[in-house]
C-alpha cells in the first residue's frame, strides 16, 4: 500500500468512528441543550436549536417538582441490596459447585441451569401473584429478593473457581482454618476482578430495571428513579424543558459512576458472552 | 483415600493432616440462597404459568375454582392481539439483530485497527447501555416529537412533509427500532471487539503482506474465525430484542393499534392493565418456549461448529 493510500484510509477510519461516536453522544447533548432552554424557545420553530440563553434554573425547578431525592434513595436501596445479594449468593453457590462434592450436587446444579433458561419477563405475572400472597407488594423485600435469583452469576463464579489452585486452600486448612475462613479469606480475594466486573454490570442492570419496579411498586414514596421519571413525563407532558431537565437528573449521576468504572463495565459485558 | 476427597472436588490433593472436619451441611448452605431463590422466583412461577395458562379462561386471576380450559387461552390470546404481537416481535427483532450486529461489527473492526488514540474511542459506545432507558427514551421522544422535534425540523427544512411518529404504524416501528439500535449496538461493539482481540494477529499480518486487500482479508480470514463469536452474539442480541419493553412504554405505549406491541409489552398490558391474566400466562409460555429454542439452538450450533473445526 502506498503512503498516500494509507493516510487516506486512516483518515476514513477516524472519520467513520467520529460519526459513530457523534451519533451515540448527540442525544445527550440535545438533552442538555433542551433542558436549559426557555420553554418558549423550544416551541418556537424560528428559534435556534442551541439555546441562546442558558436557564440552569430549569434543572432546579425539575428537581423541586417531584420527590427525586426519595426516588434516588429507593434506587440506591434497591440496586445496592439486590447487587450485594446477587454477588454473595453467586459467589457462595459458584464456589460450592466448583469445590465441593455433595450428594445432591447434580440435581441442584440442574435446577440452577433451568433457572438460567427462564427469562425474567416470562414469569412477571406469577411472580407478582406470589409477592401479593406474601404481602410483599410495595415493599423493599418484594423489590429486592426476586432479583437476587441470579443464576448467571453462580455460573460465572463456578467457572472462575474451577481455574484456581486448590493448594492455597489446603495450606490454610493445614493451619487449622475453617472452611468458611478458607472461602472468605483465601478464595474470595482471588475473585476480586470478577466480583468487580460482574458487580458493576449487575448494579447497572438493577438500577436501570424499569419493568419490575413498575409491577411491584405503585406508591410514589416507593418508586425508583426510572419509574418516577415516567410518571413525571405524564404530569409535565408539554413542559419539554422540565422533562429534559428531569432526564438529565436521572442520567448524570449514573453516567459518572459508569465513567469511573468503564474498564470493569467493558470486562463485565464481555464476561456475559462466555456462557 | 484421603479424608477430604469425599467432599472436595476429585482433583484435590490429599490433605496432609487428618484434622479437617467434614462439613456435610456446608455445601448445601452455600448453594441454598442461589438455588432456593431461583426455584422460588423462576421455576415455581414457570410451573404456575404453565398450569394457569390451561385453567380459568382469560380472567383466571379472579377465578376461585378455575376450570380446565385446555388451549382456549392460547387460541384467544393469539386471536386478540397475541399473534400480532408475535409478528411485531419478529419484525422488530430481525431488524434489531441485523442493524445492531452489522453496526457493532463495523465499529469493532474500526476500533481494532492499530491507530494512535483509538482505545479512547471505545468507552463512548457503552454510554447508551448504562444510563436509564426511560431517560434516553424521553430524549428520543423529544427528537421525534411533532413539529419542533429535531427530526421534523430537519424534514421541514428540507421541504419534506412532517412525519407523525406516534400515529403512523410503520413510522412508530421505525422510531422504536431506531432507539433500540442506538441503545444496544454498543454492546455488540464491545463483544465483537473482545472476539477480534483473540484472533491470531500473525495470520492476519501474513495475509496483509501477501497483498490481500482489506475486504478480502476480512471475508476470508476474520469472518470465518468470528463464526463462534457471531453465533454467541446473535443469541444474546436475539434474547435482548425479545425482551424489548421500556422504550415501548415510554415512546408509543404499544400503539398505534398494537403496531409497536411486542410480546413482553403484550404480557404486561394484558396481565397488569386489562387483567386478562390467562392471555398473559399463555403468551408468557410462548415467549419462554421461543427463548428456550433459541438457547438450545445456540448450544447445538456451537457444538456442531466445534466438531467440524476439530
Image (cartoon, coloured by chain):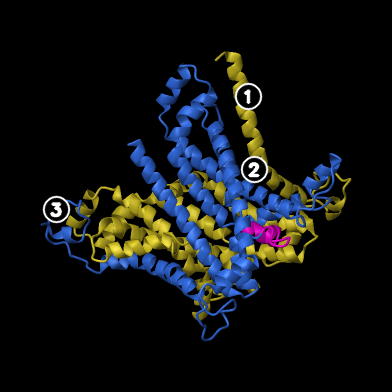
Chain colours: A yellow, B blue
> Mark 3 — on which chain does it sit?
B
- B310 magenta-colored: no
SS class, disc 2: helix
Please rate how many residues cluster around mark 1, counting C-alpha atoms within 10 Å: few if below 14, some from 14 to 19, many from 20. Answer: few
Residue B119: x and y, percent?
A: 53, 34
> What segment carries the magenta color?
B245-260
In space, the residues marked 2 and 3 are separated at their CA atoms by: 56 Å
- B113 up-or-down from B234: above or below: above
Quadrant in which the N terminus of chain B is drawn: bottom left
Task: Kindly identify which numbered label has been placed on residue A24.
Answer: 2
- B257 magenta-colored: yes
SS class, disc 1: helix
Quadrant in which the C terminus of chain B is drawn: top left
Residue highlighted by disc 3: B14
Q: Which mark lies nearer to you, 2 or 3?
A: 2
Q: Residue at x 59, y 23 (%)?
A: A10
Amino acid at each position: 500500500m502506498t503512503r498516500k493510500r494509507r493516510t487516506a484510509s486512516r483518515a476514513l477510519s477516524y472519520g467513520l468512528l467520529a460519526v459513530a461516536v457523534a451519533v451515540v453522544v448527540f442525544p445527550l447533548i440535545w438533552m442538555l441543550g433542551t433542558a436549559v432552554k426557555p420553554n418558549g424557545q423550544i416551541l418556537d420553530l424560528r428559534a435556534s436549536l442551541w439555546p441562546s440563553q442558558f436557564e440552569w434554573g430549569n434543572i432546579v425547578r425539575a428537581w423541586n417538582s417531584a420527590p427525586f431525592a426519595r426516588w434516588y434513595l429507593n434506587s440506591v436501596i434497591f440496586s445496592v441490596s439486590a447487587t450485594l445479594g446477587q454477588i454473595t449468593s453467586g459467589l457462595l453457590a459458584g464456589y460450592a459447585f466448583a469445590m465441593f462434592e455433595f450428594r445432591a450436587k447434580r440435581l441442584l446444579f440442574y435446577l440452577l441451569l433451568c433457572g438460567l433458561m427462564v427469562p425474567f419477563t416470562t414469569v412477571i405475572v406469577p411472580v407478582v401473584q406470589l409477592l401479593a400472597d406474601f404481602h410483599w407488594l410495595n415493599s423493599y423485600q418484594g423489590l429486592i429478593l426476586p432479583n437476587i435469583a441470579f443464576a448467571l452469576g453462580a455460573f460465572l463464579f463456578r467457572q472462575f473457581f474451577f481455574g484456581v489452585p486448590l493448594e492455597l486452600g489446603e495450606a490454610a486448612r493445614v493451619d487449622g482454618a475453617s472452611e468458611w475462613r478458607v472461602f472468605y479469606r483465601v478464595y474470595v480475594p482471588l475473585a476480586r476482578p470478577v466480583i468487580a466486573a460482574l458487580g458493576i454490570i449487575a448494579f447497572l442492570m438493577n438500577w436501570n430495571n424499569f419493568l419490575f419496579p413498575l409491577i411491584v411498586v405503585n406508591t410514589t414514596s416507593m418508586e425508583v428513579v426510572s419509574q418516577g421519571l415516567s410518571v413525571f413525563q405524564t404530569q409535565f407532558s408539554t413542559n419539554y424543558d422540565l422533562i429534559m431537565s428531569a432526564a438529565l437528573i436521572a442520567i448524570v449521576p449514573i453516567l459518572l459512576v459508569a465513567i469511573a468504572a468503564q474498564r470493569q463495565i467493558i470486562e463485565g459485558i464481555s464476561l456475559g458472552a462466555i456462557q | 483415600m484421603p479424608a477430604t476427597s469425599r467432599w472436595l472436588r476429585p482433583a484435590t490433593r490429599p490433605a496432609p493432616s487428618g484434622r479437617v472436619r467434614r462439613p456435610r451441611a456446608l455445601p448445601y448452605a452455600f448453594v441454598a440462597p442461589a438455588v432456593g431463590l431461583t426455584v422460588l422466583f423462576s421455576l415455581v412461577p414457570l410451573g404456575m404459568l404453565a398450569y394457569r395458562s390451561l385453567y380459568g379462561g382469560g380472567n383466571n386471576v379472579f377465578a376461585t375454582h378455575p376450570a380446565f380450559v385446555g388451549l382456549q387461552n392460547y387460541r384467544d390470546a393469539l386471536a386478540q392481539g397475541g399473534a400480532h404481537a408475535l409478528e411485531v416481535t419478529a419484525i422488530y427483532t430481525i431488524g434489531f439483530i441485523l442493524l445492531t450486529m452489522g453496526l457493532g461489527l463495523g465499529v469493532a473492526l474500526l476500533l481494532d485497527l492499530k491507530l494512535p488514540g483509538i482505545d479512547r474511542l471505545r468507552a463512548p459506545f457503552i454510554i447508551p447501555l448504562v444510563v436509564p432507558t426511560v431517560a434516553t427514551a424521553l430524549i428520543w421522544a423529544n427528537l421525534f416529537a411533532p413539529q419542533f422535534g429535531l427530526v421534523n425540523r430537519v424534514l421541514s427544512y428540507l421541504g419534506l412533509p412532517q412525519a407523525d411518529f406516534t400515529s403512523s404504524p410503520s413510522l412508530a416501528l421505525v422510531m422504536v427500532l431506531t432507539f433500540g439500535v442506538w441503545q444496544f449496538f454498543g454492546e455488540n461493539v464491545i463483544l465483537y471487539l473482545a472476539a477480534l482481540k483473540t484472533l491470531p494477529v500473525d495470520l492476519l499480518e501474513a495475509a496483509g503482506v501477501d497483498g490481500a486487500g482489506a475486504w478480502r482479508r476480512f471475508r476470508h480470514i476474520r469472518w470465518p474465525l468470528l463464526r463462534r463469536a457471531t453465533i454467541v452474539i446473535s443469541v444474546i442480541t436475539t434474547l435482548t430484542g425479545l425482551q424489548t419493553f421500556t422504550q415501548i412504554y415510554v415512546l408509543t405505549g404499544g400503539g398505534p393499534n398494537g403496531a409497536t406491541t411486542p410480546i413482553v409489552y403484550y404480557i404486561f398490558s394484558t396481565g397488569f392493565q386489562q387483567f386478562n391474566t390467562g392471555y398473559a400466562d399463555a403468551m408468557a409460555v410462548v415467549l419462554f418456549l421461543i427463548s428456550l429454542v433459541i438457547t438450545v439452538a445456540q448450544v447445538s450450533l456451537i457444538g456442531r461448529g466445534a466438531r467440524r473445526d476439530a
